[in-house]
Image (cartoon, rainbow, N blue to C red):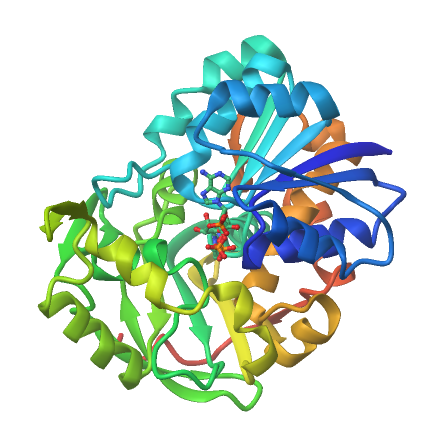
């Protein structure tokens, strides 16, 4: 029984709160804090058990530390934005509390997805006897656990890893993003990058395109190779010859994105507008639907998984495709949220549950990515808490190979 502080009342925050509230034996008290308290109160009103809510500016370490001291949680789950990661880690260190997030730190003024800022906290967390679990959503998060599971149970060595993220959902809007629009567009408009033979190969944004036939009736979709943060930690912690990340985008999404890029609406540097500096991508975020509001209208499925090839335990070549399929409408029925928020929020809850209930494996002092920990209890919890996984052994190579 422990208290949990959840920071961020967006699409993902709603799911983390709903899922933690389902486990009163683990999460005895919940405090949801975010910039806008009314959003926390709206989520609290959806639950069948009482939780506390508060306003907090998560960029402000003294304000965070005061909130943490007042509530005294065992763990903080950060599902605000990546900009807040370091401030929240600092506040956890100051108050002696464990830390979990779902996205690595990004400075506001450069679209750089790198772990070095957070890995630099390793000694401080170790010295304080505290644990930080980084990247505990689906990707990063479950994709890291899938890789560790594959290495533990199927392979002696991994040759290639392809993470394939498909959102086959339709929200009925001309253009919207299923997670924070600013973070989403920064990620997609950046140059692509993949790991091969010990170094990074850079591509232009969305330069490499293939078609992949997704299971469970989803069918063929275009997938695009882009850089994603788990590639950095996975290639550091698990030797492999090549690692890539693929995401589906519909033609409608690409068309809008190209126009927005061409007219400068995705710029992250300040421009003067009528004598006032504005950052175009921040203004664009104001215009776009919030991910947390897409739930009622989103239909279809998500399918996220890892395609892994390598040497099996018996020395033979082996090919594994391990994935989860989730239906947006099922997610909405359970948590008032669409599938992208759901598939991120459930693993964040599982990471917090493991940290609290499985200290020998998930509460070692230091800063960890999930592939460094025993995947088995996490894999079991995925099946129990709404994200069951399927293993298949395709006879054919990845399309285009
Ligand atoms: P939303 O934009 O829906 O929610 C973000 C929330 O954080 C909002 O409630 C916002 O408040 C709050 N917030 C922002 N800045 C501050 C601040 N300074 N202080 C306090 N609260 C703040 O985003 P999502 O829920 O879609 O995403 C949440 C996180 O999850 C992001 O970091 C995203 O990158 C990550 N993510 C990870 C994935 C994974 O698989 N690993 C997949 C999808 C998302 P307000 O409403 O007032 O603006």
**What residue lies at 38% left-to-right and 73% top-to-bottom?**
176
Q: Is residue 58 above or below residue 45?
A: above
Which one is nearer the viewer's eye here, 15 or 311?
15
x and y, in percent, of residue 48 in the image: 86, 58
Q: Is residue 220 something one can see in this rendering?
A: yes
Q: Is residue 21 above or below residue 70?
A: below
Q: Is residue 224 left or right of residue 392?
A: left
**What residue lies at 20% left-to-right and 47% top-to-bottom?**
200
Q: Is residue 275 above or below residue 364?
A: below
Q: Is residue 380 something one can see in this rendering?
A: no
Which one is nearer the viewer's eye here, 174 or 102?
174
Q: Is residue 281 left or right of residue 231?
A: left
Query: In the orientation shown, which residue stands out farthest toward the front?
Result: 274
Q: Is residue 227 left or right of residue 305?
A: left
Q: Quadrant of residue 208?
A: bottom left
x and y, in percent, of residue 186 in the image: 27, 55
Q: Quadrant of residue 216?
A: bottom right
């Amino acid at each position: 029984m422990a208290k949990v502080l959840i920071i961020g009342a967006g699409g993902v925050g709603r799911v983390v709160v709903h899922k933690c509230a389902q486990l009163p034996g683990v999460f005895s008290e919940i405090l949801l804090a975010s910039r806008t308290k009314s959003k926390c109160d709206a989520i609290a009103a959806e639950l069948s058990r009482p939780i506390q809510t508060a306003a907090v500016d998560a960029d402000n370490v003294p304000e965070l530390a005061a909130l943490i001291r007042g509530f005294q949680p065992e763990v903080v789950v950060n599902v605000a934005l990546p900009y807040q990661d370091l401030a929240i880690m600092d506040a956890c260190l100051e108050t002696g509390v464990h830390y979990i997030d779902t996205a690595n730190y990004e400075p506001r003024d450069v679209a750089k997805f790198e772990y070095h800022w957070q890995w630099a906290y390793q000694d401080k967390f170790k010295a304080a006897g505290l644990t930080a679990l980084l990247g505990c959503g689906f990707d990063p998060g479950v994709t890291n656990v899938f890789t560790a599971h594959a290495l533990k149970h199927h392979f002696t060595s991994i040759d290639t890893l392809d993470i394939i993220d498909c959102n086959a959902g339709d929200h009925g809007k001309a253009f919207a993003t299923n997670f924070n629009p600013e973070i989403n567009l920064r990620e997609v408009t950046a140059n692509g990058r993949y790991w091969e033979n010990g170094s990074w190969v850079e591509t232009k944004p969305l330069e490499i395109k293939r078609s992949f036939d997704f299971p469970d009736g989803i069918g063929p979709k275009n997938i695009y190779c882009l850089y994603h943060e788990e590639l950095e930690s996975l290639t550091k912690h698990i030797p492999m010859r090549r690692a890539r990340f693929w995401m589906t985008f519909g033609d409608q999404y690409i068309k809008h994105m190209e126009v927005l890029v061409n007219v400068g609406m995705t710029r992250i540097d300040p421009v003067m507008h009528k004598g006032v500096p504005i950052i175009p991508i921040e203004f664009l975020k104001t215009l776009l639907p919030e991910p947390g509001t897409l739930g009622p209208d989103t239909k279809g499925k998500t399918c996220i998984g890892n395609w892994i090839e390598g040497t099996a335990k018996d020395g033979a070549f082996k090919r594994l495709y391990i994935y989860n399929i989730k239906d947006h409408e099922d997610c909405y029925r359970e948590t008032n949220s669409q599938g992208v928020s759901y598939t991120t929020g459930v693993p964040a809850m599982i990471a917090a549950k493991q940290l609290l209930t499985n200290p020998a494996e998930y509460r070692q002092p230091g800063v960890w990515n999930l592939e460094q920990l025993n995947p088995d209890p996490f894999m079991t919890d995925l099946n129990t808490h709404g994200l069951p996984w399927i293993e298949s052994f395709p006879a054919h190579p990845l399309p285009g190979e």
